[in-house]
Image: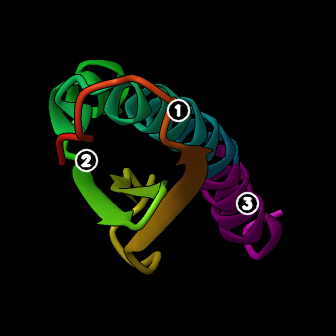
Amino acid sequence: MAAGLPALMLLLFAGLTAVDAVTTKAGCVDAAREAALAAARGEPGSTAGSRYAPAGADVSVTVAGDRVTVTVRAPVRSFGARLPRLSVSGTAVAAVEPGAPGPHP
């Protein structure tokens, strides 16, 4: 029992960190999609991405020709001091809409 309890706690912390990583990844993908669509319509993409992004996320908007690529990267809160720090990212690409003003990063 004395040897099994620390191992059980480590598995619990790793499992909670994995759940938080999946949730943060979903938030990054949603924020990247919203930012790419906003930038394709001619609105500021980084503003829209920051609105939907998880806390502490970095939003990067790139415009190349008729495509807008947005990458959102966010740190994952780890449960337990000895677990490694993780960061996840989500990327979305959108075509610039015809007739819209130029895309804004």
Q: Horizontally, is 83 left or right of 18 in the view?
A: left
The image's mark for residue 5 is 3
Q: Which residue is mark 2?
A: 57
Q: Are marks 3 and 2 in contact (CB under 8 Å)?
A: no
Looking at the rendered image, the quarter that the N terminus falls into is bottom right
Q: Earlier in the sequence, mark 3 or mark 1?
A: 3
**How many numbered marks have been drawn onto this rendered protein structure?**
3
**How far from the left and from the top, in percent, is residue 85?**
37, 74
Magenta span of residues? 1-18
> SS for tag 3?
helix
**Camera-nearest label, 3 or 2:** 2
Q: Earlier in the sequence, mark 1 or mark 2?
A: 1
Type of amino acid under label 2: Ala
Q: Is residue 55 magenta?
A: no
Q: Horizontally, is 41 left or right of 104 in the view?
A: right
Mark 3 and mark 1: span between their CA atoms?
A: 33 Å
The image's mark for residue 27 is 1
Mark 1 and mark 2: span between their CA atoms?
A: 10 Å
Q: Horizontally, is 11 left or right of 38 in the view?
A: right
22 w.r.t. 70: above or below: above
